[in-house]
Amino acid sequence: MNIVVLVKQVPDSGTERSLRADDKTVERDSASLVINEMDEYAIEEALKVKEAVGGTVTVLTMGPDKATESIRKALSMGPDGAVHVNDAALHGSDALATSKVLAKALEGLEWDLVIAGAESTDGRAAAMASMLSERLGVAGLTGARKLTVDGSKLTIERQLEDGYQVVEAQTPAIVSVWDTINEPRYPSFKGIMAAKKKPVDTKSLADLGVDASEVGLGAATSKVVDAAPRPPRQAGEKITDEGDGGSKLVAYLAAEKIV
């Protein structure tokens, strides 16, 4: 089974993140950039499927030159190769344009299954798997906490707030996964060294047959027009217990309409 994993490079959610002053897109030049956390679970699941039924695992990334660092990190976990869509005109692309570009890239690959993280830590749209299944006319199984492959039949347990659904489909299909599906492996030293030699095929918009006017900030159907920092937290109210602490606390909570 040939599997493609969607991998996005994002600013580290554990560090301070900001928007560029000029166009309100995510500041990446000075940010600490990492693989989107949920995508590591997608990579792990792809590797587990490959180990069970054979095939190949290819990483697909859309991003600037810096995304190469995350591609090599992803390859060090075990995938066989990568495709990197890199074009200056892509800056500021929204989810719709991104899905158009990724769909074109997927049309140029041989695959049975695409696995993606359920959402990215920067955009949190959680819509890419559905957009791609619509564009490519294949089944889309979203929010998996468990994936089972039996020949061309896919079965997932779709995670819900109050339980799960069992959903089936035939390949080709696109599956998005949550972080409850597995525990990603750490790259070994051997894997890190091997990743340096694995093939990375770089594609431009022209290679994919996408006109630059269809992507980027100018073509975006949604964009950030303004942002303001969160106001600093106000100091809380101190209640001194002088034998009547309980009464004071209840009075405070009642005033705040909490009780």
Image: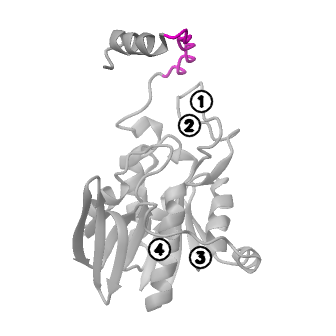
The vertical placement of 2 against 174, above or below, is below
Q: Residue at x 44, y 15 (%)?
A: 249
| SS at circle 4 | helix
Q: How many marks?
A: 4
Q: Is residue 220 left or right of residue 233?
A: left
How many angstroms separate mark 3 from mark 2 (CA)? Answer: 28 Å
| SS of the residue under disc 1 | loop
**Residue 207: image x %, image y %?**
50, 64
| Mark 3 or 4, nearer chain start | 4
- Range shown magenta: 227-243
Measured along the vertical axis of the image, is residue 79 above or below residue 69?
Answer: below
Q: Which mark is residue 20?
A: 1
Residue pictured at 35% horizontal, 9% vertical: 255
Return the residue at label 2. Answer: 26
Q: Secondary structure at mark 3?
A: strand
Label 1 – label 2 distance at C-alpha: 6 Å
First in residue order: circle 1 vs circle 2: 1
Towards the viewer: 210 or 98 = 98
